[in-house]
Image (cartoon, grey):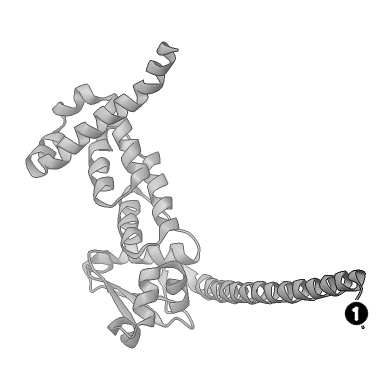
Protein backbone atom coordinates (compact mmCIF):
# COMPACT_ATOMS: atom_id res chain seq x y z
CA UNK A 1 0.00 0.00 0.00
CA UNK A 2 1.33 3.42 -0.93
CA UNK A 3 2.06 5.61 2.11
CA UNK A 4 0.26 8.92 2.07
CA UNK A 5 2.23 12.19 2.43
CA UNK A 6 0.81 13.02 5.85
CA UNK A 7 1.78 9.52 7.03
CA UNK A 8 5.36 10.11 5.84
CA UNK A 9 5.42 13.38 7.80
CA UNK A 10 4.14 11.61 10.90
CA UNK A 11 6.81 8.91 10.55
CA UNK A 12 9.59 11.48 10.14
CA UNK A 13 8.32 13.45 13.14
CA UNK A 14 8.24 10.32 15.30
CA UNK A 15 11.75 9.38 14.17
CA UNK A 16 13.08 12.87 15.05
CA UNK A 17 11.38 12.81 18.43
CA UNK A 18 12.92 9.43 19.24
CA UNK A 19 16.35 10.67 18.14
CA UNK A 20 16.03 13.81 20.32
CA UNK A 21 14.98 11.71 23.30
CA UNK A 22 18.03 9.48 22.78
CA UNK A 23 20.39 12.47 22.50
CA UNK A 24 18.85 14.13 25.56
CA UNK A 25 19.29 10.93 27.54
CA UNK A 26 22.94 10.67 26.51
CA UNK A 27 23.61 14.30 27.44
CA UNK A 28 21.87 13.88 30.78
CA UNK A 29 23.91 10.75 31.45
CA UNK A 30 27.19 12.57 30.71
CA UNK A 31 26.18 15.55 32.86
CA UNK A 32 25.18 13.24 35.70
CA UNK A 33 28.51 11.43 35.46
CA UNK A 34 30.47 14.70 35.57
CA UNK A 35 28.40 15.95 38.50
CA UNK A 36 28.99 12.70 40.36
CA UNK A 37 32.78 12.98 39.84
CA UNK A 38 32.77 16.61 40.99
CA UNK A 39 30.78 15.71 44.10
CA UNK A 40 33.18 12.85 44.91
CA UNK A 41 36.15 15.22 44.66
CA UNK A 42 34.38 17.79 46.81
CA UNK A 43 33.56 15.16 49.45
CA UNK A 44 37.21 14.02 49.56
CA UNK A 45 38.30 17.63 49.89
CA UNK A 46 35.87 18.27 52.76
CA UNK A 47 36.92 15.08 54.55
CA UNK A 48 40.54 16.19 54.34
CA UNK A 49 39.61 19.62 55.71
CA UNK A 50 37.76 18.08 58.65
CA UNK A 51 40.67 15.77 59.45
CA UNK A 52 43.12 18.65 59.34
CA UNK A 53 41.04 21.13 61.33
CA UNK A 54 40.35 18.54 64.03
CA UNK A 55 44.05 18.45 64.92
CA UNK A 56 45.03 22.06 64.16
CA UNK A 57 46.35 23.92 67.18
CA UNK A 58 48.44 27.07 67.74
CA UNK A 59 51.18 25.07 69.48
CA UNK A 60 52.03 22.77 66.63
CA UNK A 61 50.95 20.36 63.94
CA UNK A 62 50.72 16.73 64.98
CA UNK A 63 50.38 13.93 62.47
CA UNK A 64 46.67 13.99 61.50
CA UNK A 65 44.79 10.76 60.95
CA UNK A 66 44.76 9.62 57.32
CA UNK A 67 47.58 11.77 55.98
CA UNK A 68 49.75 9.89 53.52
CA UNK A 69 52.37 12.44 52.41
CA UNK A 70 54.97 14.46 54.31
CA UNK A 71 56.45 17.72 53.03
CA UNK A 72 60.03 18.16 54.18
CA UNK A 73 61.75 21.55 54.13
CA UNK A 74 65.36 21.70 52.98
CA UNK A 75 66.17 24.40 55.55
CA UNK A 76 66.42 23.99 59.32
CA UNK A 77 63.32 23.56 61.39
CA UNK A 78 62.04 25.72 64.26
CA UNK A 79 64.74 27.18 66.57
CA UNK A 80 67.50 26.04 64.19
CA UNK A 81 66.89 22.34 64.81
CA UNK A 82 66.48 19.60 62.19
CA UNK A 83 63.70 20.19 59.74
CA UNK A 84 60.43 18.47 60.67
CA UNK A 85 57.97 17.03 58.20
CA UNK A 86 54.60 18.65 57.58
CA UNK A 87 51.92 15.97 57.02
CA UNK A 88 49.24 16.45 54.40
CA UNK A 89 46.70 14.37 52.51
CA UNK A 90 47.76 13.23 49.05
CA UNK A 91 44.31 13.98 47.68
CA UNK A 92 44.57 17.57 48.89
CA UNK A 93 47.95 18.15 47.23
CA UNK A 94 46.82 16.53 43.98
CA UNK A 95 43.61 18.57 43.84
CA UNK A 96 45.37 21.90 44.35
CA UNK A 97 48.57 21.48 42.33
CA UNK A 98 49.10 19.81 38.93
CA UNK A 99 52.81 19.49 39.75
CA UNK A 100 52.19 17.60 42.99
CA UNK A 101 49.52 15.56 41.20
CA UNK A 102 52.06 14.43 38.59
CA UNK A 103 54.62 13.59 41.27
CA UNK A 104 52.20 11.45 43.23
CA UNK A 105 50.58 9.64 40.29
CA UNK A 106 53.58 8.87 38.07
CA UNK A 107 55.50 6.37 40.22
CA UNK A 108 58.18 8.90 41.11
CA UNK A 109 60.28 8.64 44.29
CA UNK A 110 57.84 10.94 46.08
CA UNK A 111 54.89 8.59 45.49
CA UNK A 112 56.85 5.56 46.69
CA UNK A 113 58.37 7.11 49.82
CA UNK A 114 55.49 9.41 50.73
CA UNK A 115 58.01 12.23 51.27
CA UNK A 116 58.39 15.35 49.15
CA UNK A 117 61.48 17.48 49.77
CA UNK A 118 61.00 21.16 49.02
CA UNK A 119 64.26 22.98 48.31
CA UNK A 120 64.85 26.56 49.41
CA UNK A 121 61.82 26.66 51.69
CA UNK A 122 61.55 26.97 55.46
CA UNK A 123 59.55 24.72 57.76
CA UNK A 124 57.34 27.67 58.75
CA UNK A 125 56.55 28.39 55.10
CA UNK A 126 55.60 24.76 54.43
CA UNK A 127 53.41 24.72 57.50
CA UNK A 128 51.71 27.93 56.34
CA UNK A 129 51.33 26.40 52.87
CA UNK A 130 49.54 23.34 54.23
CA UNK A 131 47.46 25.57 56.47
CA UNK A 132 46.33 27.51 53.41
CA UNK A 133 45.35 24.32 51.55
CA UNK A 134 42.95 23.34 54.33
CA UNK A 135 41.87 26.67 55.77
CA UNK A 136 43.87 29.90 55.46
CA UNK A 137 47.36 31.31 55.95
CA UNK A 138 48.39 34.09 58.30
CA UNK A 139 50.72 36.34 56.32
CA UNK A 140 53.41 38.90 56.85
CA UNK A 141 55.54 40.24 54.00
CA UNK A 142 58.26 37.61 54.40
CA UNK A 143 55.79 34.74 54.54
CA UNK A 144 53.81 36.09 51.58
CA UNK A 145 57.01 36.21 49.52
CA UNK A 146 57.98 32.65 50.45
CA UNK A 147 54.52 31.30 49.74
CA UNK A 148 54.33 33.11 46.41
CA UNK A 149 57.55 31.40 45.33
CA UNK A 150 56.14 28.04 46.42
CA UNK A 151 52.81 28.70 44.72
CA UNK A 152 54.53 29.69 41.47
CA UNK A 153 56.76 26.60 41.52
CA UNK A 154 53.89 24.17 42.12
CA UNK A 155 51.21 26.11 40.20
CA UNK A 156 48.83 26.75 43.09
CA UNK A 157 47.22 29.74 41.38
CA UNK A 158 44.76 30.84 44.10
CA UNK A 159 47.57 31.00 46.68
CA UNK A 160 49.79 32.97 44.31
CA UNK A 161 47.01 35.50 43.70
CA UNK A 162 46.34 35.70 47.45
CA UNK A 163 50.01 36.46 48.20
CA UNK A 164 50.29 38.96 45.35
CA UNK A 165 47.31 40.96 46.61
CA UNK A 166 48.78 40.98 50.11
CA UNK A 167 52.18 42.22 48.86
CA UNK A 168 50.51 44.91 46.74
CA UNK A 169 48.68 46.12 49.86
CA UNK A 170 52.05 46.51 51.63
CA UNK A 171 53.76 48.20 48.69
CA UNK A 172 55.44 51.59 49.25
CA UNK A 173 58.29 53.64 47.80
CA UNK A 174 60.82 52.08 50.19
CA UNK A 175 60.16 48.50 49.03
CA UNK A 176 59.07 49.20 45.44
CA UNK A 177 62.40 48.32 43.77
CA UNK A 178 62.84 45.11 45.76
CA UNK A 179 59.28 44.07 44.95
CA UNK A 180 59.72 44.95 41.28
CA UNK A 181 62.76 42.67 41.04
CA UNK A 182 60.99 39.93 43.01
CA UNK A 183 57.87 40.15 40.86
CA UNK A 184 59.98 40.03 37.70
CA UNK A 185 61.73 36.86 38.90
CA UNK A 186 58.52 35.03 39.77
CA UNK A 187 56.13 36.20 37.06
CA UNK A 188 53.92 38.08 39.53
CA UNK A 189 52.21 40.42 37.05
CA UNK A 190 49.90 42.19 39.49
CA UNK A 191 52.76 43.04 41.84
CA UNK A 192 55.01 43.97 38.92
CA UNK A 193 52.50 46.50 37.56
CA UNK A 194 51.87 48.01 40.99
CA UNK A 195 55.59 48.38 41.74
CA UNK A 196 56.27 49.79 38.29
CA UNK A 197 53.53 52.38 38.70
CA UNK A 198 55.01 53.50 42.02
CA UNK A 199 58.53 53.71 40.56
CA UNK A 200 57.27 55.68 37.57
CA UNK A 201 55.65 58.21 39.90
CA UNK A 202 58.99 58.65 41.71
CA UNK A 203 61.34 58.32 38.75
CA UNK A 204 63.25 61.48 39.68
CA UNK A 205 64.26 59.88 43.01
CA UNK A 206 65.17 56.46 41.61
CA UNK A 207 68.93 57.05 41.16
CA UNK A 208 69.30 58.08 44.79
CA UNK A 209 68.16 54.70 46.10
CA UNK A 210 70.76 52.18 47.28
CA UNK A 211 68.68 49.32 45.87
CA UNK A 212 68.92 50.97 42.46
CA UNK A 213 72.75 51.11 42.64
CA UNK A 214 72.88 47.45 43.63
CA UNK A 215 70.55 46.54 40.76
CA UNK A 216 72.70 48.45 38.25
CA UNK A 217 75.72 46.46 39.41
CA UNK A 218 74.09 43.03 39.62
CA UNK A 219 71.55 43.09 36.81
CA UNK A 220 71.91 46.04 34.39
CA UNK A 221 69.65 44.23 31.92
CA UNK A 222 66.77 44.51 34.38
CA UNK A 223 67.49 48.24 34.84
CA UNK A 224 67.13 48.73 31.08
CA UNK A 225 63.86 46.77 31.14
CA UNK A 226 62.68 48.88 34.05
CA UNK A 227 63.23 52.13 32.16
CA UNK A 228 61.72 50.71 28.99
CA UNK A 229 58.65 49.65 30.96
CA UNK A 230 58.40 53.10 32.56
CA UNK A 231 58.62 54.80 29.15
CA UNK A 232 56.02 52.44 27.68
CA UNK A 233 53.71 53.04 30.62
CA UNK A 234 54.07 56.82 30.27
CA UNK A 235 53.25 56.59 26.57
CA UNK A 236 50.19 54.45 27.28
CA UNK A 237 49.01 56.85 29.97
CA UNK A 238 49.45 59.79 27.62
CA UNK A 239 47.73 58.15 24.64
CA UNK A 240 44.10 58.84 25.68
CA UNK A 241 44.94 62.50 26.37
CA UNK A 242 46.48 62.90 22.92
CA UNK A 243 43.43 61.33 21.33
CA UNK A 244 41.13 63.70 23.19
CA UNK A 245 43.25 66.68 22.12
CA UNK A 246 42.94 65.68 18.47
CA UNK A 247 39.21 65.35 18.75
Q: Residues within 10 Å of mark 1 (few under 14, many from 20)?
A: few
* Quadrant position of the N terminus in the picture: bottom right
Q: Is residue 55 above or below residue 216?
A: below
Q: Is residue 44 above or below residue 237?
A: below
In the displayed structure, does residue 208 sit left or right of residue 94?
Answer: left
Q: Nearer the viewer, residue 234 or 61?
A: 234
Q: Work out whether residue 14 can be spotted.
A: yes
- Residue 43 quadrant: bottom right
Q: Is residue 66 above or below residue 228?
A: below
Pinpoint residue 49: horizontal percent, then vertical percent: 53, 71
Residue at 27% of width from left, 64% of height from top? 122
Pinpoint residue 218: horizontal percent, then vertical percent: 9, 44
Residue at 86% of width from left, 73% of height from top? 8
Q: Nearer the viewer, residue 173 or 96?
A: 96
Q: Work out whether residue 58 can be spotted.
A: no
For numbered disc 1, what is the local secondary structure? Answer: loop
Residue at 43% of width from left, 55% of height from top? 138
Q: Identify residue for label 1.
A: 2
* Quadrant position of the C terminus in the picture: top left
- Residue 19 quadrant: bottom right
Amino acid sequence: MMQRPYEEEETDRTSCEEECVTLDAQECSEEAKQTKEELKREIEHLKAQVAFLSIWSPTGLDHPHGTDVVLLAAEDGPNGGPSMGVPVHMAMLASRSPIFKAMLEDEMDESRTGTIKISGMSYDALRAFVGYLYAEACLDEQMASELLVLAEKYQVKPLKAYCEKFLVSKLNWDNSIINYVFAHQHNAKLLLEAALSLIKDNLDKLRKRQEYSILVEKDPRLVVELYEACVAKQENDAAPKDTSAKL
